[in-house]
Amino acid sequence: MKKLNRHKILSAACIAALPLLVVACLEFDGIIQPGRALTDSEIEVTAQLRVSPGEDGSGKVVFAVLAPKAWNLRDNATLYLTTKDYNAIQHQPEVVNEQLTLMPAEEKDPKNGLSWADSFMSVIGRGGNDPQTAMEWVVWRSSTTFIFDDKIEVDGQEVETADVHADVRIKMKTGAVPLTCELGYSYCYDKIGRA
């Protein structure tokens, strides 16, 4: 039996899907992640989000990560959401380090009726990953319901709003087996869905 070298390196590249929805435009301003990671180690990734408000852009944030199944992100990842200018733009309280919760397996994407993980796989796929590497989308959501209206009332006047920015900080543990993969990230609102 071949002994695994603990210091073999994993290579990770980002595929950041830019979901575009009718009611609001959801984009990534950036993904900050290490270019390489050791096996059995913790890595931290920051996804920088930008939401351009729409007519009815409200709901809980659904955030998904594409990673090797061997990493078991359901048990080995923690995600935190922090808004940067939500109060200034939407006049709502800022959200600071809200821990996202795993999406229950029985909950379905309202656009296509698939489980959330299957919906992300169906719409985005597995990126450029080798078919021999078992990949999966793992999905979390916020407990806060966000309101991203394109117009709000301020001092009796209706005013257009600007983009809102937020960060999702992801702490995840890599697996014990060395492999090369492309990690993926995407997000949407729970009321609108991914498709």
Image (spheres, rainbow, N blue to C red):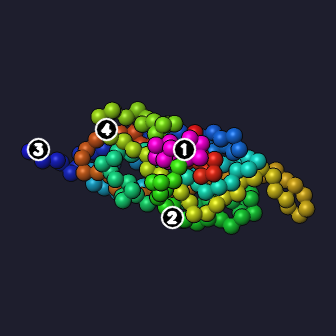
Residue at point 89%, 64% (across, down): 155
Mark closest to the chain's N terminus, 4 or 2: 2
Q: Main secondary structure of the magenta part?
A: loop
Mark 3, Cα crowd under 10 Å, few <14 / some 14-19 / many 20+, is few
Position of residue 85 measured from the top left corner of the image (x, y, whole percent): 68, 59
Compute the Cα span from label 4 to label 2. 29 Å
For mark 3, what is the residue? Answer: 2
Q: What segment carries the magenta color?
A: 109-119
Tell us which disc is closer to us: 3 or 2.
2
Mark closest to the chain's N terminus, 4 or 1: 1
Above/below status of 66 relative to 154: above
Amino acid beneath label 2: Gln
Residue at point 37%, 34% (across, down): 129
Q: Quadrant of the N terminus?
A: top left
Above/below status of 19 relative to 161: above
Compute the Cα span from label 3 to label 2. 39 Å
Residue at point 61%, 57% (across, down): 60
Q: Quadrant of the C terminus?
A: top right
